[in-house]
Image: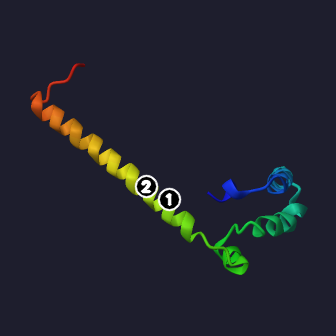
Amino acid sequence: MQSQHWLETDWAELEITTRLVDAFFQGETRHAGEIRQRVGKWGATTEDRARLRMSFDQQAREEAAKAAQEASTSSMDEELFRMLSDATGGETDA
């Protein structure tokens, strides 16, 4: 997750931006340009990330590995449930 690497100043910038977005949604549309500039600095869109030369290769690999581990664990749980169900003839303790 990108926010894991944020500094205190990044969080302060996010707080300012959230206040601008809140004002925007309350009708102060004059903040639209400022909001766009601020979120663009974080790489909000694919175009922003390309311009900033941001790379999430390592993050993507970590997330893929975590998802694979979770899927594997889930599959093992389902397989164990099936094995136990088969062993008891499908009976449950409900």
Q: Which mark is residue 77?
A: none
Quadrant location of the N terminus in the rendered image = bottom right
> Which amino acid type is marked by label 2?
Ala
Q: Are marks 2 and 1 in contact (CB under 8 Å)?
A: yes
Residue placed most toward the observer, 36 or 91: 91
User: Quarter of the image holding residue 68?
Assistant: bottom left
Q: Amino acid at mark 1?
A: Glu
Q: Which mark is residue 67?
A: 2
Q: CA distance from mark 2 to mark 1?
A: 6 Å
| Residue occupying image coordinates x 77% and y 64% | 39
Q: Taking 72 as reference, is 44 above or below it?
A: below
The location of residue 83, given as percent across then percent down, is 16, 37
Q: Position of residue 94 (x, y in %)?
A: 24, 19
Q: Quick check: 42 above or below 3?
A: below
In the rendered image, residue 66, in percent from the top left (x then y), is placed at: 45, 54
- Look at the numbered disc 2 and give the secondary structure of its residue: helix
73 left or right, relative to 48: left
Q: How far across and how far down the image is residue 84, in percent?
A: 17, 32
Q: Is residue 61 left or right of residue 21?
A: left
How many numbered tags mark residues here? 2
Residue where numbered disc 1 is placed = 63
Residue with the most extreme top position: 94
Q: Residues within 10 Å of mark 1 (few under 14, many from 20)?
A: few
Q: Residues within 10 Å of mark 2 (few under 14, many from 20)?
A: few
| Vertical placement of residue 6 versus 33, above or below | above
